Every structure is written in C-alpha cells, then in structure tokens.
Amino acid sequence: MGPIRSKLAVMALAVLTASAAMQAQAQAPSPSPEVRKFLKFDQPLIALTHVRVIDGTGAPAQEDRTVVLRGGRIEAILDAKAAPPAGAQVVPLEGHSVMPGLVGMHNHLMYTASLNQDEDGKLPPPGFLVTELAFSAPRLYLAAGVTTMRTTGSIEPYTDLNIRRKIDAFEMPGPHLDVTGPYLEGRGSAFPQMTALEEAAQARRTVAFWSDEGATSFKAYMNIPAAVLGAAIDEAHKHGRKLTGHLCSVDYRQAAALGIDNLEHGPVFTDSEFVANRKKDVCPPSSEIAASWEKLDVGSPQVQGLIRDLVAHKVAITSTLPVFESFVASRPLLSRQQQAMMSHESLRSHLAARAAAATSPERAAKLEAALKKEMAFEMAFVRAGGLLLAGPDPTGNGGVLPGFGDQREIELLVEAGFAPVEAIRIATANGARYLGQLDRIGTIEPGKNADLVVVKGDPTRRIADVENVTVVFKDGYGYDPAKLVASVRGMVGVR
C-alpha cells in the first residue's frame, strides 16, 4: 500500500472510530437531573488544551498537549500547537496536569462509623459494626478522581449491586464498580455483619449464588479455614471471578498455593506464617503477627523467599498504606476539610482513638517502623516483578475517608520510594490490568474511555498536587469535584 493510500486508510479508520464512539455515547443513558447537578462539561467533543499528560504507563510526563475527547473516548493526544478539532469545546488548562482516572482496588461503600468501645477500650457484643455509605462514598470517590473501584468486601452486597445499577443508569454520580460478594469469613469474626463459613460446600454455594446475583469479585477474610478458602477460590474461578483475601488463619504461602489471585494490605500487618507454634486454621493475635515481623528484615532469606513465591504464583498485592498510617499517633491528623466531611460521632470516635494511641510513644514508634517495613516490602515486591495495586481501605479507626484516602495512598507510595509516575501507574494501570480492563481504562491512549483526572499543578514534581482535583472525566462527562464534596459534608459515617 502506498503512503497516500495508507494515510487515507488511517484517516478512514479514525472517522469510523469517532463515529462508533459518538454512536455509543448516544445510545448510553442520558444523565439524570441528579447527575447533571454535578457536571461541568457534557459536550460530545472536548479539547483539553495546554495540559501536561501523565499517561499512567510510568513514562515521563508529556508537556503542553491537547487531549481530544469525543463521544466518551480519548480520540487523540496532540501537540498544543495543533488546532483543536472544529466544533470542540475548548478547555484551556495551562498549569494543569491530566492523569488516568484512579482505579481503587481496596475501596468500600462502607465505613467505620464508631469503634463502640466500652470503658476498658474493648468492643462489647455484638462487636465491630460498620455503616453502609450508599450516598456519600460514591460521590467522594468520584470527586477525588476514582473512576473505577473494587468494593473489596461488602457488608450489604445487594445495596452495592443496586448502587452499581443506578450509577450505570446515570441515576446517581459515582465510579464504575467492581462489586465483591459478601465477605467469605470463618467463625470467630469480630464483625457480626459477616457470615461464618465452616464447610467447603457452603463456600461453593455462596460464591455460586452471588456470582449469579452479579458480584464480579470475592474476598476472603481473616478466620476462613484453608480447605474452605480453597473451595471458594476454585468456585470463583469456575465463574470467571477473581478472589482476594485479607487473611490470617491462612498464611500468604498457603493462599498462593491454593490459587488465590490477590492479597490485601501486604504481609507486615497480616501474614501469620512466621508466628511461632501457630495452630492450623487459627488466626493468631495481631500482636503476635507484629512481633514475628519485627524480627525480620525485608532482605532476609525468609522474606525474599516469600516474595519469590508470590511472584511465581502471580499473586497481586494491594497496598493500603493509609489505613495503617491512621493508627500512627506521630502522623498528621486528618485535614480540616476531611474532618468536616465526617459525622459528629465518627469524628469523635476517630479522635478518641488517636488520643489513646498517643499515650504510648513506644507503640507509636513500633507502628511507624512497621509502616516503613511494609513500604520496603512493597518496593521489593515490585522490583522482583510483582503486581502492586493501590487502595485506601476506609475502615480501621475511621481515619481514612473515601476518595481522600486514594489520594493519600499515592503520596505514601512516593514516600515508600516509588517515583511519582510509578506511584500513579500503580494507582491506575495496575488496577486496570488486574481487573482485565487495561484495553479500556488505566492509561491515557487514543481509543480508551475518557476517564481522566485534571489536577492543578504537577504531581511528577510535587506529589501532593494529586489532591488539587479540578475536573474528573468519566466516560467523557466532566464532573465538578467541589460540588460533589459539598453535597456530602458531615455525612461520612451516617449515609
């Protein structure tokens, strides 16, 4: 084919692609009045001009570009000197950067409303309760730039599934949702909202039922027995689902051998394999897990062997550094803006937990050291070829809020030693890869969904600029983060 014919073929393909994108957006549901309240841009053709592009691949940023969005897709990335397409809504963005929409991989539509501790600091019956945030969480995630997220454990799975349907139908704002089924837990849980699976057949029935109901992922929890976990993994894979775990009674190597796809939080706070005299299928106290890791260096043969084993089994690790940081009394308190998002009871509960933690400098020092060790593990895991994912986990002592925690996770990955573009890749492209959606989301490339975050500043030089979100594009619609945040002030922990 000659050069002219080749060029014509490329142009024809571009026209067909644009036409298909426009047709797809035209066929999609129209935003409801409730969604339109939060839209800054809803034109079918938009040109973001003079913007810095951080494309999510880990490559250096591209300066002074024009990103063309058409019909909910990214059509082109041009030199800013090129004229925008005729008829485009031009959005000048000097001094701004655009990144892929964040892919939150340990996010919840629930939250620790209150620790409900008694005078002795213990949890009275029925135990640790969490609150579904069906209204506030989707808005806060989207406002922070999270355009796709995995719920990574559901307390009210039907609520989560219905939220997904409403978001997809443009009845309410929020990210695209990968919904996990209910927690797959054993006996002895501190959470009365979880089931207790004791038999492999029970686990298989649970996974099969919730797969049919629409759950697209599963999560095992701390007290699940190994045989039950193995059955759940096998059943999930039969249904084309992946299974992750926040484990304890089953250690990381055992889970990898059983075929688990993903492990949450990293091992320093959760992997029980180095606890002496451990009993089969019994979750040892968290203090014993912490003590077992205090004695280990990330460069030790034991930890390096664990890393090799996880990489060989292709087990992804989800980094959730913010939830651990919230327990470290020497770390900063939540910003005033975040505190304003919280209900009175949630804020009181969190501040009380932080005040109690501050009474023990020795414990604070140990937690800080453990946090640093977890950071070092995650760096070593990635350097060995492991797939690291990112998410905030808005539970714990209530110190991690939806959306705000996703931004903080990126900042902590940079503190761990990752270059800013690496941290952004972990929070975008890596999650998309794990979910099998890298062909649609996760990086800024022509043909992909127009899921983008516009921030004021340059996160490649100052990672805190990831907090300066000015517009969030999801499927080509530009949302106003300030309006989303303002709509849920004082509601986190309530609704």
Image: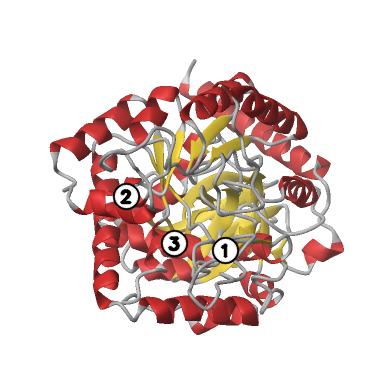
Q: Could you tell me which secondary element the residue under label 2 belongs to?
A: helix
Looking at the image, which residue is at 32% across and 38% down? 278
Name the mark nearer the viewer: 1 or 2: 2
Quick one: label 2 or label 3, which is nearer the N terminus? 2
Q: Could you tell me which secondary element the residue under label 1 belongs to?
A: loop
In the picture, the disc for residue 289 is: 2
Q: Is residue 418 visible?
A: no
Seen in the picture, residue 440 relative to 153 is either above or below; the reply is above
**Disc 1 residue crowd, few under 14, some 14–19, many 20+, Cα 10 Å:** many
Quick one: label 3 or label 1, which is nearer the N terminus? 3
Residue 410 figure quarter: bottom left
Please name whichever residue, 440 or 400, is drawn nearer the observer in this view of the structure.
Answer: 400
In the visual, does 20 lie left or right of 282?
A: right
Seen in the picture, residue 95 relative to 234 is either above or below; the reply is below
Amino acid type of the residue tagged 2 in the rendering: Ile
Task: Say which residue label 3 marks.
Answer: 323
Looking at the image, which residue is at 68% across and 53% down? 45
Amino acid type of the residue tagged 3 in the rendering: Val
Name the mark nearer the viewer: 2 or 3: 2
Amino acid type of the residue tagged 1 in the rendering: Pro
**Image x and y of residue 377, in percent:** 26, 47
**Image x and y of residue 224, in percent:** 52, 36
Quick one: label 1 or label 2, which is nearer the N terminus? 2
In the picture, the disc for residue 491 is: none
Please name whichever residue, 143 or 388, is drawn nearer the observer in this view of the structure.
Answer: 388
Q: Are marks 1 and 2 in contact (CB under 8 Å)?
A: no
